[in-house]
Amino acid sequence: MFFQTKGKKERELTMKIKNKLQALFLVFVGFVGTTLLATDFYKVPAGSTATGTNPLATREYYASGYYPKTYTLTIGPEYFIGKYEVTKEVWDIVRDWGRANGYDDLPDGVGKANNHPVTYVNWYDCIKWCNARSEMENRTPCYTVGGNVYRVGEDDSVICDWTASGYRLPSQVEWEYAARGGLNDRRFPWGDTITHSDANYSSDISIPMMSARPAAIIRSTMT
């Protein structure tokens, strides 16, 4: 019995050390910068604005609130948005840490490869994952329920603290501004046409539309 108890404690200690090393590695990589772990961030200055006209393709039409003819985007406080989607490898590192620290129901997710975007995770999963990564890096989590850090379950009463130093999903305006890549009056950040070397998509018209892709994560500050 003594040896069994000791073995259990040793396994728990090994897991704690592993989690800490993973967290330190992710923080270190985030500081150094790498595309493999998708931890690079782009700074969007406060007060940035973008105005323009959305182009129309075959069989398209304008729709208020969905695809308006003109747009005006204004950014409030500065923020940092991930240059890349969250990869399966980064998801797994944070997920493992989270499961060992109160985020009991973070899913495995799916990825074509470790350096491909994680998929098959829902909105609740993503914001809990953001909180887990925030805590893992000693940042203040953005999402709370009843004043407590949101860690488990699917709760529609979640509140986001937009000023917290942790990770969160971008707002619609923040995402659209970043997605346009500083290029106005165009369908894509690089122009009006697209090929499979630019993105994964399917279409039956001459100017294809991009398929849905996982949202990036952002944080309010770099400190």
Image (tube, rainbow, N blue to C red):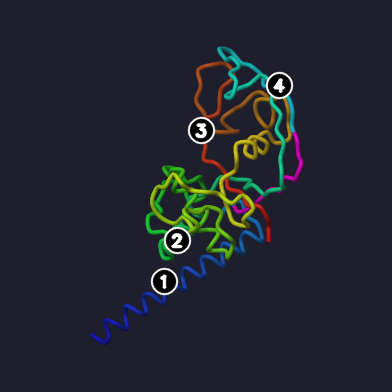
At mark 1, the secondary structure is helix
Q: Secondary structure at mark 2?
A: helix
At 47% across and 46% down in the image, what residue appears?
A: 118
**Amino acid under disc 2:** Gly
Q: Earlier in the sequence, mark 1 or mark 3?
A: 1
Which circle's residue, 1 or 4, is located before the other in the chain?
A: 1
Whichever of callouts 2 and 4 sits on the residue coming sooner in the sequence is: 4
Residue bearing mark 1: 15
Label 2 with label 1: CB-CB less than 8 Å: no
Q: Measuring from the top left, give residue 136's x and y in whole percent.
A: 53, 63
Please name the residue that numbered disc 4 is placed on: 53
Q: What residue is shown at x 72% (from left), y 36% (from top)?
A: 74
Quarter placement of the C terminus? bottom right
Q: CA distance from mark 3 to mark 4?
A: 22 Å
Identify which residue, 75 or 212, lies in the foreground: 75
Amino acid found under the numbered disc labelled 4: Thr
Q: Nearer the viewer, residue 40 or 65?
A: 65
